[in-house]
Image (cartoon, rainbow, N blue to C red):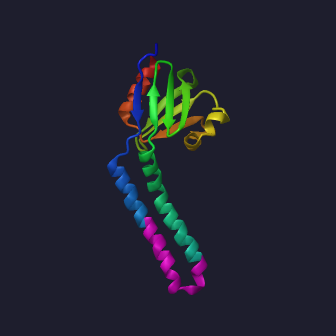
Amino acid sequence: MESSALFFHTSIDSTQKKKRLLTGTFVASIGALCLLLPVIYPSLSLALFIAGIAFIATGLIPYKKITRLENFPITLRCTADSISLRQGASSLVIRYAHITGIFYDIKKRSLILELRYILTPEPLKNAPWKRYYSLKTLRLTLPQFTKEAFEALKEISSN
């Protein structure tokens, strides 16, 4: 018989989403301005075109990331002996024995799992986990989780 499990999901703060949208719109509008400037400065048209496309992409990517996370949230399932992560069709199971520390980054609203071993390439082939895992620091950073989820996870893992 399986013991009870706690489930946590990513939660996108509407003020943070609005801030990313406004910042992205401002940066993208600079890019649009760069696309219009070749009319005035025809000799710089190629450089301004490249800069305009770069500004537009830079402005819209952070908003795209947060809306993707909103549409496909990360589900964290905590049992007595392991943590299961699921996003879309991809899943990853990490036993508490492989976790050396659990931290919370207040500024980024992220759970950080510090791992004892390098994750094998097999689970990292699945789309989302490659993006959140750092081979250099052996940390798996899970964005947009609440402080309450961190405290509950810390309590479960310490038992």
* Of 83 and 154, the residue lying toward us: 83
Is 155 on the left or on the right of 39, as rendered?
left
* Of 59 and 68, the residue lying toward us: 68
**Residue at left offset 60%, top offset 27%:** 116
Q: Can the viewer see residue 136 in this picture? A: no
Total labels: the figure holds 0
**Residue at left offset 43%, top offset 61%:** 24
Residue 56 vs 112, above or below: the answer is below
Residue bounds of the magenta highlight: 27-46
Residue 137 vs 37, above or below: the answer is above
Looking at this view, name the residue that lies furthest to the left.
Answer: 15
Residue 99 vs 48, above or below: the answer is above
Q: Residue 82: percent from the left, percent from the top?
A: 51, 23
Looking at this view, name the residue that lies furthest to the right.
Answer: 121
Q: Can the viewer see residue 144 in this picture? A: yes
Q: Residue 50: percent from the left, percent from the top?
A: 58, 72
Please tell me in which quadrant of the rendered image residue 100 appears: top right
Please tell me in which quadrant of the rendered image residue 158 appears: top left
Looking at the rendered image, the quarter that the C terminus falls into is top left
Is most of the magenta stretch helix, strand or loop?
helix
Give yes or no for residue 38 being in the magenta stretch: yes
Looking at this view, name the residue that lies furthest to the top.
Answer: 1
Give yes or no for residue 49 being in the magenta stretch: no
* Of 91 and 117, the residue lying toward us: 91
Please tell me in which quadrant of the rendered image residue 8 appears: top left
Q: Residue 134: percent from the left, percent from the top?
A: 59, 40
Q: Residue 26: percent from the left, percent from the top?
A: 41, 66
**Residue at left offset 50%, top offset 35%:** 86
Is 66 on the left or on the right of 94, as rendered?
left
